[in-house]
Amino acid sequence: MILCYPLINQHDHTELMYSLRSVEKFLSRPYEIILVGEVMPDWITGVTQIELGDIPGKKQLSIRRKILAALEYSDEILFFNDDFFLLQPLTEVPFYYNGSLKSYSESGSKPLMKQLEAMRKPVKHFDIHYPIIYDKRF
């Protein structure tokens, strides 16, 4: 399993440290960790870095680019943010969503919504702060 963390440019990676500790404790091996971003914590070892910066003022578009970069590395990823903490073993990742992208006005969601509609795919809003499985084959 590939576990992917998109990182923003910051110098305090305390949340990432605690998230990785929870993964080590509660996620079954084997897994590989990919960090996608420019600034890496100096204490981290044993991870793969995909160096990719943020687009200023375009949070959603930056995240999308980082997910796509990770999917170039692997067909399937388990997407985590640095403030996701496991409190028990993760045995499955349910598909939670919060309404439709149509109800969100962020500029980064509109191009995605148009692409999904053109492909006749659902336009559900999955950015609800929960691990997500992305599979580029679907």
Image (spheres, rainbow, N blue to C red):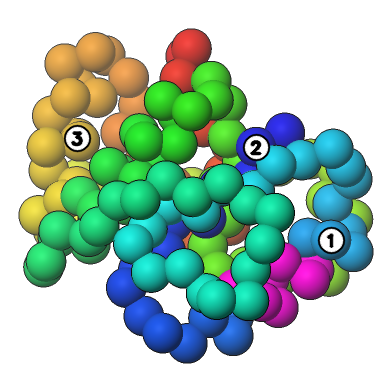
What is the three-letter code of the residue carrying label 2? Ile
Residue 80 on image: x %, y % = 57, 55
The magenta span reads 16-22
CB within 8 Å, label 3 to label 2:
no
In this rendering, the answer to whether 10 lies above or below 38 is below
Q: Return the mark for residue 95.
A: none
Residue at the spot of label 1: 24
Q: Secondary structure at mark 2?
A: strand
Q: Return the mark for residue 2.
A: 2
Labels 3, 1: front one: 1
30 displayed left or right of 137: right
Residue at the spot of label 3: 113
What is the three-letter code of the residue carrying label 1? Glu
Q: Is residue 20 magenta?
A: yes
CB within 8 Å, label 3 to label 1:
no
Q: CA distance from mark 3 to mark 1?
A: 35 Å
45 displayed left or right of 117: right
Q: Residue at x 65, y 37 (%)?
A: 2
Dot 3 or dot 1: first in sequence order is 1
Q: CA distance from mark 2 to mark 1?
A: 13 Å
Q: Residues within 10 Å of mark 1 (few under 14, many from 20)?
A: few
